Image (spheres, helix red, strand yellow):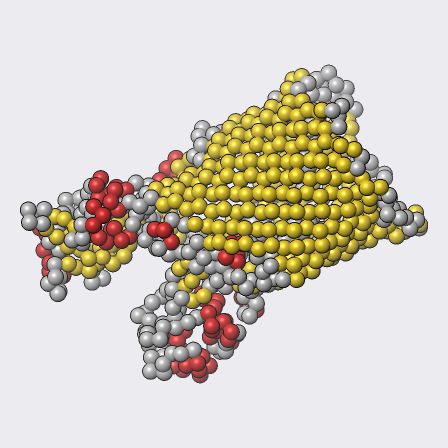
Amino acid sequence: AVYGSDAISGVINFVMKKDFSGAEVNANYRINEAGDGGTFNGNLLLGGNFEDGRGNATVYFDYTKRNGILQSARDYSRQAQVDDGEGGLIAGGSGSIEGTRFAIGGVNRKFEPDGSFSAYSAATDAYNYAPSNYLQVPQERFLMSAQTHYDVSDALTVYAEGQFINNRVKNQLAPTPFTGSVSLDADSSFLSAGSRALLQGLDTDGDGFVTSTIYRRLSEVGNRVSSLDNTAYRTVLGAKGDIGGGWNYDAYYSYSRTKSIESQTGNVSRSRVLQALRTTYDTGGNLVCSDTSNGCVPLNIFGAGNISDAAAAFITIPVQNSSTISEQVASASISNRELFDLGAGPVGIVFGTEYRREQGSYNPDFSLSSGDVVGFNAGEGLGGGYNVKEVYTEVAVPLLADLPFVKKLEVNGAYRYSYYSTAAKSVNTYSGGAVWSLIDDIALRGQYSRAVRAPTVSDLFSGASQDFPAATDPCTTAVALTNTNLNASCLSNGVAASVIGTAYDGGSTQIQTVNGGNPALREETSDTYTAGIVLQPRFLPGFSFTADYYKIKIANYISTVGTTNLIRACYGDADNGYTPYDASYCGSLPRDANSFAITDAANTLANTGGVTTRGVDFEARYGLPLGFGAFGSDTSRLDLRFSGTRLIAFDYNPLAAIPDLTIDCAGKFGQTCGNPYAKWRLSTRATYSTGPMTVSVLYRHLSAVKDDDSATTYAVERIKAYDYFDLTAAFRIKDGFTW
C-alpha cells in the first residue's frame, strides 16, 4: 500500500548522496586462495555545488572485471559425479560420447576412430563433460550514475537522475550431445569392413540404411558458449517544493529500458545433422550427401575426432536472441507532516497518484524457435505490455502522549487503489498498525498489510514452448481396469473402453507439454501480520533490542502446476481412491483423437497454490566508548550488533486443489522446496575503532537443512550447519586516503 501494489516481497531503499562535494576514489582486487578467479573493482565519485549551494551535481563511475574459473581447475569439480542411489557420489558422465554410442536391438556399441566398433561400457566409456564448464563465469560490468538538483525557489526544486549500466557475462558448456533416431549408411566408406558387415546384416529392408539411436558428443564443433550483453538505462525528471500551509509536493517522470542480446556459438542444427548423415556415392565413387543443398558435407560420426572441419562448419548454427524490457512511471504526491495536532503530536498525511506502463519482448533466433537447435525444444517469442493507474493515501496519527503507561500511542494507515489493464483489473491494497510506547524504555508495535503482485509481462505474454517431462498417463495402467473411479474418468475424458489399461501411448514415460504465459492471470495476494517489541533501557545507554513475530500468507501463487500434478488433479490418485480433486484441470490434458494419448498438456502459468510462512526477526545493538585508545588517540569505541531470523514454518503448496501436496520447507531443501530454508540465520558483528584505525569481524551462521524427499536416498541428504567469519580492517593514512 505504501510502496506500490507490486511490492509483495518488500522494497530496498537506497540512500543517495545528494550534496556531495569533492572527489572519492576506491579500488580493490580480490583473488581466491588458489590464485585464480581474480576480481577487480574500481569506482570514482565526483560532485560539487553551484549557485552558492542552491544546486549540486554528482556523477559516479564503477568498473568491475571478474576472471572465469573452469571446473577443470579444481579437484572436486573436474570429474562429473552422479548419485549412486545409496547416499553417495561416484564418478560418472554422459552416455553421449565422442566416438558415438549406437543402440540397435537393445545392444549398445561404440565406434572406434578407424570406423570399427566395440562393446560400450558405461563405467569406462562415459564422457566427462565437467572440465569444460565454468565454476565461476567471467564478467565485465561498467556503471555510470549522475544526479543533479537546483533550488529555483522555496516553492520549486527541480531534479534529474540518470543511470547507465552495461553487463557482459559469458558461460560455457561442454560440446553439444546429439541424441536421437537416425539413418546410418550401411555402405559408408567411413566405416571399417567389420562395421559395414554389422550394419548390412541389420538392414532388414535392403534399402542400404539402418535405423539406430545414436549418442554422439560433437566435440569437433567446439564448446557451447553463450555471451550475454545486457545494457540498461534509467532517466528521471522531477520537481518538488513547498506550496504553503505545511504542504509539499513531489512529481516526477521516469523511463527505464533494458536490452539483452545473447549470442550462442557451438550450437548444432538437428536438420543438418540428419541431412549430412544420409549419404550416397556420386558417379566418381565419392561419398556425398544424398541431398546436397546448402553445401552439405558428409558427416563422419563413426569414431572420435573424425568429423572434418567442413562438416563441422556445415552442421554448426550460430544463434542470437534479444529481449527488451521498458517501464514508464509518472507520479505525483502532496504531503503534510503537520496537518493538525490532537495533543500527542502532529498528524501527517500523504495523497498521491501514479501511472506505470510496462512493455516487454523476447525475440528468439528462428532456428531456436523452430526447435532445430539440438538440445532446445521449440519455443515462441514474447511480446506485450500493460499499464496500471493508481491513487493512494497514507496517514500517521499520534493519539496519546505523556500519560501513565502511555508515553506515546500512534496509529498509521495506508490505502492504494490500482486499476490494471490486464485481467487483474481493480486491486485494493491497504495497511494499518500501531506503536505503543509504555515508557521511554519499552514500545510495542503491530501491523497488518494486504499486498499484491501483479503478473509481469513475461508471466502474461511468454510464448509457448515445448517440454517432455516425466509423467505417466493413469489410463494406461492396470489400475484403470479395476478402479471404477479412474475407469469412469478415463471414459469421460475420451479414452476408448477397449484400450483402457493398455500401453496405447507406446509405453511412454514422458508427456508432451506446452509451457508459457497466460494473459488471464490475476494478481497474487499477500496478508502480512507482524507484532513486536522495542527495548531501549535508560540504565544501559547505547543498547537497543527489537523482536518481531511475522506471519505471511500468499494466495493465488503464480507458478506452473507441473504435468504430474495436472494429472493428479484431474484423475485423483491412490490416496483418495482416484477421485478427481478438481475436474476442471482435465481441460488442460487434451488427448489425440486417434491414439488417445495425452498431447500438448497445458502447463502454462496459473494462479494456483500458495505459501504460508511464520517466524521471528530479532536484533540487538550496543555501542560504548572506551577509556583507552591507540595511534595517538586516547579514546576508542566498540560497537556490537547481533541479528537473526528464526523460521518457524514455510508451508508451500503448488496446487491448492490437492492439500496433501503441502510441505513445510522450514529446515529443508530439494526437489519441491528448492533452495535451502534454514531455520536459523544469525549474524554478529563487532567493530572496534580508535583514531585512524577500524577493525571489524563478522560472524554468520546458517543452521543445517535436510532433503525434502524422504522416499529417495540422495548423495546429499543433509547440508550441515555453516559458520562464516569475515575480518576487515581500514586505516586512514591521512584525510582523503584510507587503506
Give residue 274's position: percent from left, percent from top. 23, 54
Q: Is residue 681 visible?
A: yes
Q: Quadrant of residue 223?
A: top left
Q: Nearer the viewer, residue 109 or 208?
A: 208
Count of number-bearing discs: 0
Quadrant housing the C terminus? top right
Give residue 504's position: percent from left, percent from top. 32, 74
**Residue positioned 71% across, 24% down in the render:** 50
Q: Nearer the viewer, residue 25 or 580?
A: 25
Q: Nearer the viewer, residue 659 or 346?
A: 346
Quick check: 245 above or below 588?
above
Q: Quadrant of residue 659?
A: bottom right
Give residue 342's position: percent from left, percent from top. 91, 51
Residue 90 vs residue 26: left or right?
left
**Residue positioned 9% across, 49% down in the render:** 282
**Residue positioned 28% across, 45% down in the render:** 316
Quick check: 694 above or below 207?
above
Q: Quadrant of residue 179?
A: bottom left
Residue 378 vs residue 717: left or right?
left
- Residue found at the far left of this picture: 284
Q: Is residue 685 visible?
A: no
Residue 277 vs residue 52: left or right?
left
Quadrant housing the N terminus? bottom right
**Residue positioned 47% across, 54% down in the render:** 382
Give residue 202's position: percent from left, percent from top. 14, 61
Quick check: 461 above or below 231?
below
Quick check: 33 above or below 472?
above
